[in-house]
Image (spheres, grey):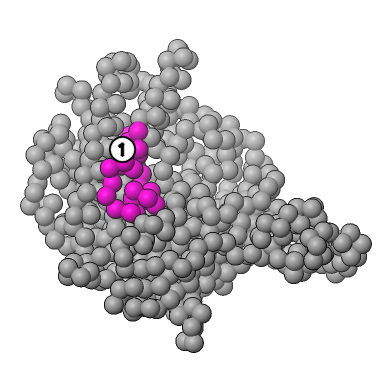
Amino acid sequence: MIRDAVTFEVFRNAVTGLADEMAITILRTAHSQLVASSMDFSAALCDAHGRVIAQANTLPVHLGSIPDAMEAILDEFGGRIQPGDVYLLNDPSRGGMHLPDIFAVAPVFAGEALLGFSVTVVNHTDVGGWAAGSMAVQSTSIFAEGVQIPPSRLVEAGVMNETFLQLILRNVREPELLRGDLESQLAACHTGAEGLRALAARHGVDGLAALVDELLDYAETLLRAALAEAAPGTYTFTDHIDDDGLGSGPIPIQVKTTLSESGIELDFTGSAPQVDSALNATASFTRSAAYAALQGILAADIPANSGFYRPFSFVIPEASILNGQRPAARGARGLVGFRIIDAVLGALAPVFPDRVPAAGDGGPDGIAIGLIGEDGESVVLWDALAGAWGARPDRDGVDGISSLGANLTNTPVEELERSGHIRIDGYGYLPDSGGAGRFRGGLATFRDMTMLAPKASVQIRSDRRKFLPYGLAGGAQGTPSLNVLDHGGSGERVLESKPHFVMTTGTRHRHVTAGGGGHGSPFERAPERVREDVLDGKVTPEGARRDYGVVITEAGVIDASATAALRGEARSGASSTPTDGTFR
């Protein structure tokens, strides 16, 4: 036990700041748009046993998977770890999540003492396979998705294994982009290593280990205290993914959450078997999404480390979509993680009614564009597009923001257009797309694109077309996502939510994310707030009348008598607003 509270608090903030410094290193040195602009990466520090000490403020659904990656590294190299080493992996059956997410792990020594590990995870633009971006929903085997890296040594005692590196680079579409982002990972690992050695110099090797133990115990204590405030019991919720992208669906994600004195158990029995497409997740990713859901609704001062994980226990069926077995494809597994978060939050809504939001857009949609440039080289463009959060118990949902599990940013228009291959014709919010409620769901985001290149393949991962974002406490559902090819043209047609198609010069496409669900009865929303939404263009006058029972005149003022009459009629004939999830 560390008796000096000041020392402990300084250490706690120092090690968390160090993890964030690693993330900033990646952000400033990465080469690809997906990493440097959309920020699809993570960083963490682990101790000598592979336990997570601190995580950067990056992707929660990455970070909870680090313990499994560390276990795979230690199983492979334990006893042979030496200063100057760097290990890689991405194999979902050997500690990874899906192939584009490459883990780089660097051991940190002080003399002969192993202090811990610097760990980075980067979603690389492309790692090979049949489809640009390596995340095609239609992949039916991991062998179609790209280069598989079991736990391997990239750098040995400071010497790069160039043969191994060239083998990886030869199998991807943009090798120099992967090399640049990988070098960014190594630079961040170096940053973490230098900082960890500085902490060991300050506190001593044994003192550092003792502080780590105290930090993990501290996180566990805080989480157990937060759970102790909740009513013990079992809470079940089922949400759905529309389909698997190959014509099979709906796909249930079911969770039974049990709160007791021993902690929290999440039993996913009843969820769908693994599917033929690339939506299958790993058990580590399922756990990671569950951690993220709980972290998102509890106090922000609980450290996100291996101590936080201790009160959890899981039942994750094998050969399910939450625990796919080799050679299942995994490239599009991110969508499953976001739906796990929605299901876990749905189960916890009765437990924490003042904290749990309605469902958001279902996670950032991913649009991968692959083409051949004029120089004959492959080009991969990624458009990560986030829509909205669902309404919260005390305020509206946020527009244009990533799911709490992803923490990504929308791809800047300039980043997409500077390649010269596409043009963005429109980008913004759609009115009436946020679920109505006392608090309104966030608005759907749309993006209109025109293809300038002669030919390009396009792969889209989206959902929430059929099973809309659920509302809570009487709030309405959100609105569906949409893909429209030849948007505005004579051949306009609506595509499925997970299409793979070809665009040629002049072809237009519109993508719309789902809108967030509402919270509370729409007829309890203050008429003045509805009026403000109308003036802001977030709700149309027709939507105000239809969804909220508020009449706005052409002059932009509230017709109080008409509003009172309309709301009275609506209340007298209203039933409870349905949700997409199933409460039990």
* Amino acid on which disc 1 is placed: Thr
Quadrant, the C terminus = bottom right
| Residue 24 sits above or below residue 538 on the image | above
Position of residue 515 measured from the top left corner of the image (x, y, whole percent): 59, 62
366 relative position to 146: left or right: right
* Near-viewer residue (303 or 583): 303
At label 1, counting other C-alpha atoms closer than 10 Å, the crowd grade (few under 14, some 14-19, many 20 or more) is: many
Q: Total label count?
A: 1
* Near-viewer residue (141 or 236): 141
Residue 221 is at least partly visible in this image:
yes
531 relative position to 254: left or right: right
Name the secondary structure under disc 1.
helix
Quadrant, the N terminus = top left
Residue at the extreme bottom of the image, as rendered: 490
* Near-viewer residue (387 or 492): 492
310 relative position to 23: left or right: right
In the image, residue 22 lies in the stretch drawn in magenta: yes
Position of residue 218 measured from the top left corner of the image (x, y, whole percent): 48, 27
In the image, residue 531 lies in the stretch drawn in magenta: no
| Residue 19 sits above or below residue 448 on the image | above
Residue name at image x 20 percent, y 27 percent: 109
Judging by the rendered image, the residue that carries numbered circle 1 is 25
Position of residue 279 measured from the top left corner of the image (x, y, whole percent): 40, 65
Over which residues does the magenta segment extend?
Answer: 21-45
Residue name at image x 60 percent, y 60 percent: 443
| Residue 194 sits above or below residue 64 on the image | above
Specify the quadrant of the image occupied by residue 201. Answer: top left
Residue 74 is at least partly visible in this image:
no
Residue name at image x 42 percent, y 55 percent: 412
Residue name at image x 31 percent, y 49 percent: 122
